[in-house]
Amino acid sequence: MSDLNSKHNRIVWCDIFVDDLDRACAFYEGVCGITCTKESFEGYAFAVLEHKEGNGGCLVPRQPGQARPSGNGVMIYLNVDGRIRDAVQQVAALGGKVVQDVHAIGPHGCRALIEDSEGNAMALHSTIDA
């Protein structure tokens, strides 16, 4: 983890549960404009979202009996700063759904609410509407 994972950052990592690792990697690479690196540990496959200069996360295959992705949990905001319009266009093309298009959130920039390719509720965030 980077130095940005200090006592001042409340969220230091996230696991995003997925049903199809390849599909989810393509979704997050296209929407977030980052790389997604598949890895394995002790026979368990997962994918790490690029995070050289900030807090990161993994795409983790959902295990049998584990709750299905839904919009009834924590809302993760993904950084698409300066390219939110492009990111929103990629959502449907990569198997996701735009729930609420780009809209202002006061002095905090703008966001769009989406479902990823696996059914997880997410927000895309940018400091500018571009």
Image (cartoon, rainbow, N blue to C red):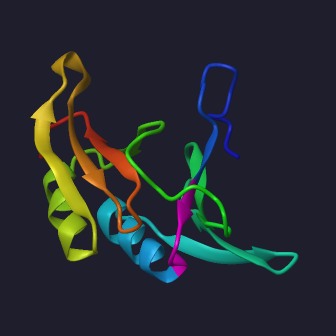
Tell which of 1 and 116 is nearer to you. Answer: 116
Q: Is residue 86 left or right of residue 8?
A: left
Q: Is residue 74 left or right of residue 99?
A: right
Q: Is residue 116 magenta?
A: no
Res. 96 visible in picture: yes
User: In the rendered image, which quarter is residue 51 located in?
Assistant: bottom right
Tell which of 47 and 117 is nearer to you. Answer: 117
Residue sitting at 58 percent across and 43 percent down? 55
Residue 75 percent location from the top left of the image? 42, 37
Res. 129 visible in picture: no
Q: Is residue 20 magenta?
A: yes
Look at the picture and state if 10 lies above or below 110.
Answer: above
Q: Residue furthest right?
A: 42
Residue sitting at 63 percent across and 77 percent down? 38
Residue sitting at 68 percent across and 36 percent down? 3
Look at the picture and state if 14 lies above or below 12.
Answer: below
Residue 54 percent location from the top left of the image? 55, 43
User: In the rendered image, which quarter is residue 10 located in?
Assistant: top right
Residue 91 percent location from the top left of the image? 23, 65
The stretch in magenta equals 16-21
Q: How many marks?
A: 0
Q: Is residue 11 left or right of residue 89?
A: right
